[in-house]
Amino acid sequence: MPTTLFNELAIILMIAAVLGAIGTLLRQPLIVAFIAVGILVGPAALDIVTMAEEMELLATIGISILLFVVGLKLDLEVIRTTGPIALATGLGQVLFTSVVGFGICMLLGMSTVTSLYIAVALTFSSTIIIVKLLSDKREIDALHGRIAVGFLIVQDIVVVLVMIALSAFGATTGAGEGEQVNTVAVVLGVLGKGAAMLIGIGLLMRFVLPGLVRVLARSQELLILFAIAWAVSMAMVGDMLGFSKEVGAFLAGVALASTPFRETISGRLVSIRDFMLLFFFLHLGSTLDLSTLGAQVGVAVILSLFVLIGNPLIVLIIMGAMGYRKRTGFLAGLTVAQISEFSLILGALGLTLGHINEETMGLITLVGLITIGLSTYLIMYSHQIYARIERPLSIFERKVPYRELREGEPTTATDAIIIFGLGRFGDNIARELRGVGAKIIGVDFDPRIVGHWRREDRDAQYGDACDPEFPASLPLSSAAWVVCAVPDLKTNLTLTKALREHHYEGKIALTAHTAEHARILQDTGVDLVLLPFADAAKHAAECLMGQAEPSEPPPEDSA
């Protein structure tokens, strides 16, 4: 047993680092590892946690910073750019999961309040985990990635509204029997305080915060210190006014979201947020009673299967009905196949308010461990899974037209050159080819880049080079070249295979960054393999030796 709080903390952090490393090797989010650490150091195992109050304080600060960052990054523009699909899918999935989940819990014999809490907890998906996984797969800017981020923002807004409602409900149920007649007055009081809080924050956003933050931004350290102080202070104000600390911290982030320094603040706070959240999951794990969890495994499995299957299914149905292809709906749907850290925070709030007991909190946590663990692998291997179940998914897809194809009808130009990947390299290739009169069709999986091309009256459409079905929508019979400017080996091989399966008879050019990948691509029999770094180095050497003229700089608005 540690003799001091410092020694205890050091041991806990070392155990967390070791189990975190093991979790990373197993390709699991750190949330799972940290809850396991809490169980390990808690009374159920090593029983070395004596600083329960200190850990709870650190956990509360971590949650406040988490909600502050969520509010800080609240970007309604993402919802607008993905159209009505983010709202329809986000709200549709929330409604479906909460209603059906409530029914399942009632059939399992739970009380009304317990069923309500569990049903709502099953609704939310982890923004942190999903954004991290999509970023690692380089799919955050793909259409399904942007739609997923859009409906995750909708979920974040809903969870804050739920916390506000629970705070008001907690205020009414906390009254004694003789005070129950004042329920309406209590609710109106909470709403009045909420309105006053919003008005106060609005005035600060208009007249105080922009100038104050601009002055504080002269020192990065002072700016981050103010951000943390502002988040924790607003959490305190929210708690004093009868709301939860989480609501106050979220509004603190919203108050700074309109300043030009929000990206700087959020970027610097990510590491602090992740470290402080460690204590929330440690505290949660250390308070779990494993003896009660054993009896709930069957119920947890049923609820987990509902989340793993039901949530993606409703997203697939909604997106299919709105005209999206089955592949886009499937990939976006997998991102909601888990519950989130907000589900655990919501459960902890219900426990604090006395609405649920520790057994219910343990059940929510167990469902979280199962769904987070399994959904991580589902998202990582989403393309392989889709390839195996592609045919049955056709029932979720409208025949014609596909929404993403309607956004940009394929050209009928003859002797066109189709370029996949409109980043710097692909855009520069297109610019040079247009300069000599070539007809270009641009393809990219980032809707923003596609929109940029269309605004300049350039022929472009949304598409994913990894989608084996997509080439069928292109005018392959009239294309002289198909160029893949994406230097990813798997992408190039997948596209080449798809082109040949669709009987493309023109020439193919692929891109590689290494000699090894270039040899692999050449062995497929393609006509040309581009080596941007090697070609640029050769041209630079020729310019230095006076054997070639330097290239003209690209236009400033080049993508």
Image (cartoon, rainbow, N blue to C red):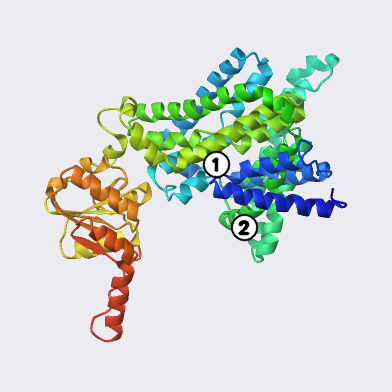
**Residue 114: percent from the left, percent from the top?**
67, 20
Other residues around mark 1 within 10 Å, as few (<14) / some (14–19) / many (≥20)? many
Q: Kindly identify the amino acid type of the residue bearing the numbered disc 1.
A: Thr
**Residue 96: percent from the left, percent from the top?**
50, 23
> For this view, does 251 lie left or right of residue 502?
right
The local secondary structure at tag 2 comes to helix
Q: How many marks?
A: 2
> For this view, does 467 lie left or right of residue 103?
left
Q: Front-most of 472 and 11?
A: 11
The local secondary structure at tag 1 comes to helix
Q: Compared to 558, does 245 lie above or below?
A: above
Other residues around mark 2 within 10 Å, as few (<14) / some (14–19) / many (≥20)? some
**Residue 312: percent from the left, percent from the top?**
45, 30
**Residue 268 image label:** 2
Q: Is residue 460 visible?
A: no
Question: Label 1 near label 2: C-beta < 8 Å?
Answer: no
Q: Kindly identify the amino acid type of the residue bearing the numbered disc 2.
A: Arg
C-alpha distance separating marks 2 and 1: 18 Å
Give the quarter of the image for residue 193.
Answer: top right
Name the residue: 79% across, 14% down: 181
Q: Compared to 499, does 92 lie above or below?
A: above
- Indicate the quadrant containing the C terminus: top left, top right, bottom left or bottom right: bottom left
Name the residue: 73% across, 19% down: 184
Q: Is residue 492 visible?
A: yes
> Farthest residue in the bottom direction?
545
**Residue 191: percent from the left, percent from the top?**
69, 28
Name the residue: 74% across, 30% down: 289
Of badges 2 and 1, nearer the viewer stands 1
Q: Front-most of 504 and 490?
A: 490
> For this view, does 458 lie left or right of residue 218?
left
Give whichever of discs 2 and 1 has the lower sequence position: 1
For disc 1, the marked residue is 127
